[in-house]
Amino acid sequence: VRLLEPYTVTTDLEPHFQESCLASCVMAQWCRQRVAGRTPDFGDAAHEVLGEVELARLAGLKTGAVQPVNERERVIAERLRALENNLTRVA
Amino acid sequence: MNAFEEALHRVAARQHGQAILLRRSSSLSADPNTTIGIATIKIVTEEQVQAIAFGRIGGEPEILVRLDPISRDVSDLRPFAAFLAAIADDAQRDDGALRIWIPHAGALEALDVLGHRYWRNQSAPDAIRRMGEICRIVAHEHAFPGQQTVADAAGLLREHVITGLTPIEEGHLNAILAWLDPFVLQPLEESRERIRVPASGVLPNTPDQPLDDRVDRLRREAKGASGSRRVALQREITLILSNAVLREWRLMVEAREGFLRLGLPAAGLGDLVADSCKRIKAGLQFGHFPARSPERLTIQLGQMEVGQQRAEQASIENDPALRTQSRNAGAVMLGRVSNVTQPRQGRKPCHIEVDSDQRVIRFRRDDKVKILDSNVHGVVRDIDVSPGGGVRVALEITSGVKSSNVLAVGTLMELVEESFGFVNVKALNAARDRQPWPFYSDAMPNIGAIPRPSGSLLAIARRSRRP
């Protein structure tokens, strides 16, 4: 049996990125790149409460460019708009 | 703030490329006259401090490097001990008013371990023991919610702002700072680059910066070296540690300035400041005595609860953002006065009813409540469904009965439960004198033989029921 070099199998791996990976796994950055721009990239809690959503879709929900497809997205869109009207940015 | 709101704030921060304020008021009072900073570098595996930067905020810090931190010789700690003793004297003269800025909680842990190691170490000189005691007093004070002595820069920023990072990444002070700096155009990329170098009071040990390993090797070499070779090795250790601890100090100063730049008002913190000053003054004057007996532990837990209540009350009263959150959670009730019963105007008795659209409130009968932005206080006497389907709360007004502008039908008001703010020390000391066995003894007192019941529990219950 010929063992493959680890780098040759990385494309076959299925990433399951979690926050704790950042503190414990050498593959964390590789896995995080696979969820970049999606809710898992904001942490476990964000992934859980918002579901797996693209950041671009969230921006569209906020502006109204994207129509919500379910109740969760409707609430997200409403809360994002309310937040936008009240938030104070730093700097 | 719940997880859903927090997630949306992170999304908004990422979209705007800037940190977003979570609060509209500061949880930290203004710095008192005696305000210092302390940053540390510890050996990861030994929990030993190997470098300290300390000094008054606004000036350059003094750097203390320990060439052999696991040695029994503690003379190298004398400058830090002398500094802390002088600061303690200043704070005592100012009735316990003291502020100690640290970059993050890791620095406080390092100081606490330092304190534990020396505060009762009979082989250490008096000055070092006093240093240990002051470290313990400061670390102990930090355990009280709402305390106003220790300013944990990273913790304060996390409490007041949110970034587009994950919560675990916000543990890195330098990463948060990237989101506060207007000159950083790509805060996500910049903060993730900064995370590569730790900001947790340890030396970096990455492939490109193997400083922890380097210092370890230099120490081993220095032990076997002599003359100019030994001096050169020690100089390199000093340089590495000085740079590392100075970096921690500068992060702390930058974080403090960033926090102050938020410009948040620090209102309603007077009681918390007074509590902190009192504890610090007593500790510095009489020494640190950890609570061990049941009544002392209960008093301490009570004081912590009071701190928590006072901090929450100050937030609700002075921070519109947190007040809204509390209203959503039912801790604050927004309603309109629907009925006032006051036979003689401006006199007791006075009862009012307040109707709210809120479906959920946390009040219970007999809770003491306060009408926000007024001097009116009352007690909840009844809770019912309002005609509109919300909640109707009946209050007996206990003080402020002359406030006719508030106690009038149609007035919009916000009710909040009043913090108890009291530890019954007298009752707890009386309990100590009585020494009840469940708290003060391991053995149950002998109360003689008790007849063992027999039969089913149902039959026993029937027999014991009064006719």
Image: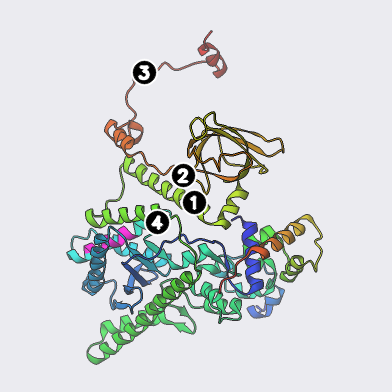
Image point 22% across, 62% down: which residue? B130
Image point 48% across, 40% down: which residue? B400
User: Circle 3 — which element?
Assistant: loop
Q: Earlier in the sequence, mark 1 or mark 4?
A: 4
Q: Are marks 1 and 3 in contact (CB under 8 Å)?
A: no
Say the numbered circle drawn on residue B135. Answer: none
Q: Which residue carries the number 4 mark?
A: B147
Chain identity of mark 1: B
User: Circle 4 — which element?
Assistant: loop
Q: Separation of disc 1 and disc 3 at Cα?
A: 51 Å
Q: Separation of disc 3 and disc 4 at Cα?
A: 51 Å
Q: Which residue carries the number 3 mark?
A: B449
Please check whether the numbered discs 1 and 4 fall on a single chain. yes
Q: Are marks 1 and 2 in contact (CB under 8 Å)?
A: yes
**Which stretch did the figure color magenta?**
B129-138
Q: Which residue carries the number 2 mark?
A: B419
Q: Is residue B62 visible?
A: yes
Tell me, yes or no, whether the highlighted magenta stretch contains residue B293: no
Q: Earlier in the sequence, mark 3 or mark 4?
A: 4
Residue B448 point in image, percent of width and height: 34, 19
